[in-house]
Amino acid sequence: MKAVGTLAVGVADLLSRPGNTRHEHLEAVLGELAVLGSHVPVGGTVVLDLELQSVNDAIVAKGTVQAPWVGECRRCLQPVERVLEADVLEIFEDNPVDGETRQLDHDRIDLEPVARETILLELPLAPLCKDDCAGLCAECGADRNTVDCGHGQNLGDARWSALDQLKFED
């Protein structure tokens, strides 16, 4: 029997009664979960709210996973803190199909890999503090969300300035 993670759940009662369901609310602190622009903070609690259902010789896990995340805004470099919530739908069976279903370990399912993969896929690579973040001024570096530095926002590339004079006739 393989070692199971902190989100392992016994399902013997469900396997003995096909069609039965059970709600599971699980919380765990998982190790490092990070992508390029954001990560789950150390000690951040991952929450799974799932309905487990016995179907034939398999268990279907359907619900949500939630996790706090932190990062740095890609435009203004201010810290960003949010909570992600993502849907989960997994099938656990004795003979899993690679990439489609997961291993049912006798009478247990391990939800830690499911939680990890879901969170890693949902963490933003380039977080924003807000959708309309104005970012930093390219000339002086001021945060344009908090101050009007007076510099133009539309800085063009001088190498293309000849195209500014180009006129098209209708």
Image: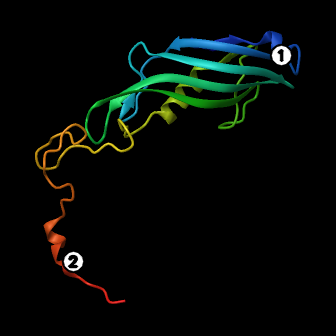
Q: Position of residue 144 (x, y in %)?
A: 22, 42
Q: Residue at x 42, y 23 (%)?
A: 40
In this view, the mark in front (1 or 2): 2
Q: Horizontal placement of 63 versus 47: left or right?
A: right
User: Measured along the vertical axis of the image, is residue 152 above or below residue 130?
Assistant: below
Q: Horizontal placement of 122 versus 21: left or right?
A: left
Spatial CA span between label 1 and label 2: 70 Å
Quadrant housing the C terminus: bottom left
Image-quadrant location for residue 60: top right
Q: Position of residue 158 (x, y in %)?
A: 13, 68
In the picture of the structure, the residue carrying the numbered disc 1 is: 15
In the picture of the structure, the residue carrying the numbered disc 2 is: 163
Q: Horizontal placement of 159 versus 128: left or right?
A: left
Going by the numbered disc 2, the residue's amino acid type is Leu
Q: Horizontal placement of 44 versus 94: left or right?
A: left
**Residue 1 appears in the figure:** no
